[in-house]
Image (tube, rainbow, N blue to C red):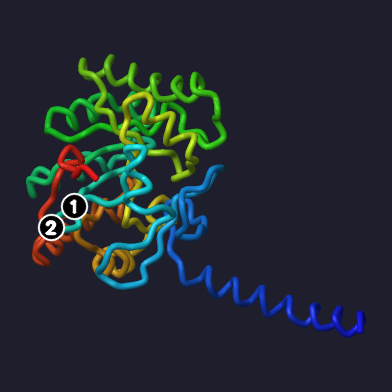
Amino acid sequence: MRRLLRDSLLLLLPCLFLAGALYVQGRVTAPSEAVSSPAAIPASAANWGLSFPNEGQSPVGNATVEELAQYDAYYLGDTSKKVIYLTFDCGYENGYTGSILDTLKKHNAPAAFFVVGNMIESAPDIIRRMAAEGHIVGNHTCHHPDMSAISDQAAFQKELDGLAVLYKEAVGQDLPMYYRPPQGKYSVENLKQAQALGYKTIFWSLAYVDWYVDNQPTAEQAYSKLLPRIHDGAIVLLHSTSKTNADILDDLLTKWEGMGYTFASLDELPEV
């Protein structure tokens, strides 16, 4: 009997593995491509992840809007309106941010640029232009570490304060209080730490694989992800280092406008 049970379990294990693999293939996550289930906020470290059960509708995240709201965190904006919140992650400047800013000005579209210390130090004129043209410059930390590995409040604060100091030196203004965890890695502790410092944590509800500078998607590949999955109240994450994004942004915003969407600042996020 024991031998029969053992043999049955051995036969069952590959089936379970295959079922799990198929489930993973059905989910979409970004920007770290890690998979996590749409459950309550995990107590320990996790990666922000999304699934898109219905095209054109809000995706399901690791946590609900209400759960995130406890910590002044968002992944969706106002889902009662055809509005899009544009955000860009900026690790460094490689020649495309100016074109992106030109396109945003053409469409009168506000955006939030989540920058790291190197971006401010190496391209202060770009940072000053972002601020002068009315865009939000947000905190993506000074050195882009895995913040979910930092449990000490002082060490967590040092990463955010370091970026804020660089911004103040470059722009002469205080850094807007918006924070995005590098790679979407976070924990409840991180959300509490950011909230205690007065930050709103900003995740996203739409992104695609655009950050490999030596393996850029085609325009068609980008559109195949960004057009059918757009939804009311979308917080869109794009990378400013992407040539594809710079090339298609004018046409992309035009297409979204043609679908009836307008663009809003993170300052217009609704209270939950």
Q: Are marks 1 and 2 in contact (CB under 8 Å)?
A: yes
- Which quadrant is the C terminus positioned in? top left
Q: Locate residue 266, reporting x and y percent.
A: 20, 41
Q: Residue at x 10, y 54 (%)?
A: 262
Residue labelled with disc 2:
81
Q: Disc 2 residue type?
A: Lys
Q: Residue at x 31, y 57 (%)?
A: 206
Q: Image check: 82 left or right of 71?
A: left
Q: Is residue 258 above or below residue 238?
A: below
Circle 2 residues within 10 Å: few <14, some 14–19, many ≥20: some
Say what secondary structure mark 2 lies in: loop
- Which quadrant is the N terminus positioned in? bottom right
Q: Locate residue 153, reporting x and y percent.
A: 49, 23
Residue labelled with disc 1:
78
Q: Locate residue 216, reporting x and y percent.
A: 38, 57
Q: Is residue 265 above or below residue 249?
A: above
Which is more toward the observer, 165 or 179? 179
> Which mark is on residue 33?
none
Q: Locate residue 5, reporting x and y percent.
A: 85, 81
Residue 97's image quarter? top left
